[in-house]
Amino acid sequence: YTPGKKAVLILGGYRLRRESDKMPKKAKGNSESINSRLALVMKSGKYTLGYKSTLKTLRSGKSKLVIICNNCPPLRKSEIEYYAMLAKTHVHHYTGNNVDLGTACGKYFRVSSLSITDPGDSDIIKTQDPQA
């Protein structure tokens, strides 16, 4: 072991790392902040879950923010982004997959996209769209 170099110790098939080798704090903190804001929207605001209802709210102009998971199919993602661009609505690309997004919404099913129509007590729209 030499100081200043990364030390990886392999014991019984497990790799043990030092604290400095882990994920950067900012990425983890950012996802936690969006999750907590999303939980507040679920409790106090109005939202629609799913692809079809997201497109409906975008077409009607009610949507304030759209959140898309990272494993949403490219064609579906581009269609949502196109509708959001026409509706002048901000799109947030969620860092987790559809299972993670469903869990963040407090649901036991997968969610590929969601549209927030009323943020309630949450400041999710101000933090995701600074010019709003």
Image (cartoon, rainbow, N blue to C red):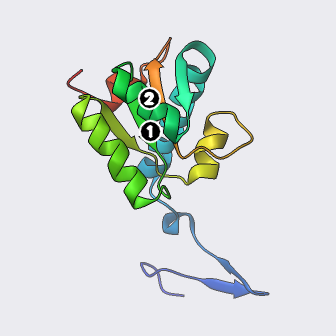
**110 vs 93, nearest the viewer:** 110
Name the residue tied to disc 1. Answer: 67
**29 vs 51, nearest the viewer:** 51
Q: Is residue 65 visible?
A: yes
Q: Nearer the viewer, mark 2 or mark 1?
A: 2
| Residue type (three-letter) at the residue carrying disc 2 | Lys
Percent across and percent down for residue 67 are 44, 38
Residue for point 51% across, 37% down: 52
* Residue farthest right in this picture: 12
Q: Is residue 110 above or below residue 88?
A: below
Residue for point 46% across, 59% down: 73
Q: Which of the 4 quarters of the picture holds residue 50?
A: top right
Residue for point 34% across, 47% down: 79
* Residue farthest left in this picture: 131
- Mark-to-mark CA distance, 2 and 1: 14 Å
Name the residue tied to disc 2. Answer: 56
| Secondary structure of residue under mark 1 | strand
Left/right of residue 12 with respect to residue 66 in the rendered view: right
